[in-house]
Image (cartoon, rainbow, N blue to C red):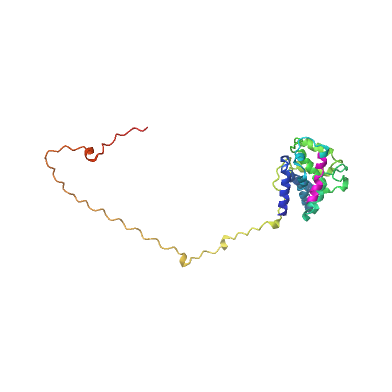
């Protein structure tokens, strides 16, 4: 239930801007895949996955006019946008289950050369989780359409990201991303249905099927015995024998002309048939 609420919140953030639909789920998938390529422990992979899923939650406090602006941000607007990592950390610090994920959320815009935000951390001061989320976040931003830019060709994306090594990214994280792409584990703008794992304990075990040989034969009680079928119906009686009756011989007296039917009943002759085509 808790993780379902986390996923719903991330989806609500993405829904603020139609250009970022599915962004949080993709970044979570890319980040966890990078961590797996780097052979990090499974528990750490899951921490990175959830931190990436929640990395933009602070944007809930940013005006829609800034999030969806088609052109470049003004200096004032950019300063407002830069507050979203700390806003997100402030929202989630009250959730004990997310304590280990907050560094990845708060510092995913820090650069290894110290030019990032919100605190200007550099090198090893930046948590590894945040470094991984930063690479995944940048990859998704460059390979999807945004109000301020069109999706870029994949070869250019990797060339450009490698040019940021030592400035924004660390080399082994960028190379892990490229390896994941080459192995078909990730692709640009991919649809991610669910980034959450289901614990085996959460799945109800199925009862084993009972062999047919062990099934007991049904027992018929007296009340369950079907009644005998009804007797067949009796044959119908034979038709009565027709008796021939002798008709009287008509007299040879002259016939009286028959009066018209309408003269006695007032009903006229039968009407002629009318063609109704």
Q: Where is residue 141 in the image (x, y as percent from the top left)?
A: 77, 40
Q: Position of residue 264 (x, y in %)?
A: 22, 40
Q: Where is residue 189 in the image (x, y as percent from the top left)?
A: 72, 40
Say whether residue 60 is visible: yes
Which secondary structure class fits the magenta region best?
A: helix
Q: Is residue 5 above or below residue 183?
A: below
The residue range painted magenta reads 77-91
Say whether residue 33 is visible: no
Observer-nearest of 103 and 160: 103
- Is 109 on the left or on the right of 236, as rendered? right
Q: Position of residue 270 (x, y in %)?
A: 27, 37
Observer-nearest of 196 and 271: 271
Q: Is residue 86 magenta?
A: yes
Total tally of numbered discs in the picture? 0
Quadrant of the rendered image containing residue 203: bottom right
Quadrant where the image shows the N terminus:
bottom right
Observer-nearest of 112 and 170: 112
Observer-nearest of 148 and 66: 66
Quadrant where the image shows the C terminus:
top left
Q: Is residue 55 magenta?
A: no
Q: In this view, does 246 lie above or below 204?
A: above
Quadrant of the rendered image containing residue 185: top right
């Amino acid at each position: 239930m808790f993780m379902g609420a986390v996923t719903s919140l991330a989806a609500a953030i993405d829904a603020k801007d139609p250009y970022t639909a599915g962004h949080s789920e993709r970044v979570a998938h890319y980040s966890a895949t990078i961590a797996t390529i780097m052979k990090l422990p499974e528990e750490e992979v899951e921490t990175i996955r959830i931190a990436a899923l929640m990395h933009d939650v602070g944007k809930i406090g940013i005006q829609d006019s800034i999030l969806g602006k088609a052109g470049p941000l003004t200096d004032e607007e950019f300063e407002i946008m830069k507050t979203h990592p700390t806003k997100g950390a402030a929202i989630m610090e009250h959730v004990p289950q997310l304590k280990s994920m907050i560094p990845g959320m708060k510092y995913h815009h820090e650069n290894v050369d110290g030019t990032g935000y919100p605190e200007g951390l550099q090198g090893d001061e930046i948590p590894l989780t945040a470094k991984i989320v930063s690479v995944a976040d940048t990859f998704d931003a460059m390979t999807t359409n945004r109000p301020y830019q069109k999706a870029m060709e994949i070869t250019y994306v990797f060339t450009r990201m490698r040019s940021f090594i030592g400035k924004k990214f660390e080399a082994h994280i960028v190379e892990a991303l490229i390896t994941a792409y080459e192995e078909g584990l990730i692709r640009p703008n991919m649809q991610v249905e669910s980034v959450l794992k289901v614990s085996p304990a959460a799945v109800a075990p199925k009862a084993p099927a009972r062999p047919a040989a062990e099934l007991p034969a049904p027992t018929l009680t007296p009340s369950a015995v079907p009644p005998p079928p009804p007797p067949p119906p009796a044959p119908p009686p034979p038709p009565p024998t027709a008796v021939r009756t002798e008709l009287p011989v008509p007299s040879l007296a002259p016939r009286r002309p028959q009066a018209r039917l309408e003269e006695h009943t007032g009903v006229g002759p039968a009407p002629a048939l009318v063609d109704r085509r």
